[in-house]
Image (spheres, helix red, strand yellow):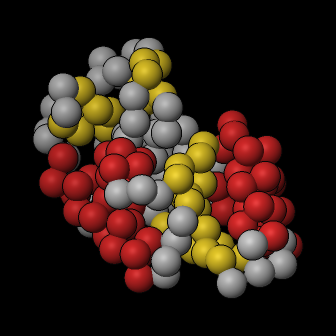
Amino acid sequence: MHYLLVSACLLGETCRYDGKEKRYEAAEALRSLPGLTLVPFCPECAGGLAVPRVPCERKDGRVIARDGTDKTGPYTRGAGLALETAKERHILCALLKERSPSCGVHEIYDGTFTRTVIPGSGVTAELLKQNGIRVYSETEIEALYEYIQNLSAL
């Protein structure tokens, strides 16, 4: 049995800052793969943030809310809990929501709240990568499927 950590919003949970979900059918389809169990996780909620909440973006190594408050603490807590969950379940990879200040894999918003995207990773994605966990965004679903199929062949 293999476990996959998945951004909960991609599986339809209403945990985003705006109280909405970002259901991604290809993520849902992963449930049908034999020998794979999905572990939905929202690091922002796990870190203690409410739904809905003020939008946040990463800037200069911090996570700042649009109202100017520093939310780095809850984001860091949530990332730590995601890593703890991954270690407990022996999770080798994760599917995370691109551009999120927590889960962005390759891109994040630049901290100006102008929807400007820059290269970078969210707090959780960064921590998981630093600890040897493969991290995929929803834009890389084919590569994730291939990785899972290779795991299943072992």
Residue depicted at 53% across the width and 53% down the height: 134
Left or right: 145 in relation to 92: right
User: Foreground residue, 129 or 99?
Assistant: 129
Left or right: 101 in relation to 137: left
Residue depicted at 34% across the width and 50% down the height: 130
Left or right: 8 in relation to 29: left
Image quadrant where one finds the N terminus: bottom right
Q: Is residue 47 visible?
A: no
Location of residue 95 (image quadrant): bottom right
Q: Residue 110: percent from the left, percent from the top?
A: 35, 21
Residue depicted at 42% across the width and 18% down the height: 118
User: Foreground residue, 117 or 126?
Assistant: 126
Q: Is residue 34 visible?
A: yes
107 lies above or below 128: above
Q: Residue 154: percent from the left, percent from the top?
A: 75, 72
Q: Residue 69: percent from the left, percent from the top?
A: 14, 39
Residue at the outermost front position: 154
Location of residue 143 (image quadrant): top right
Q: Residue 83: percent from the left, percent from the top?
A: 36, 66
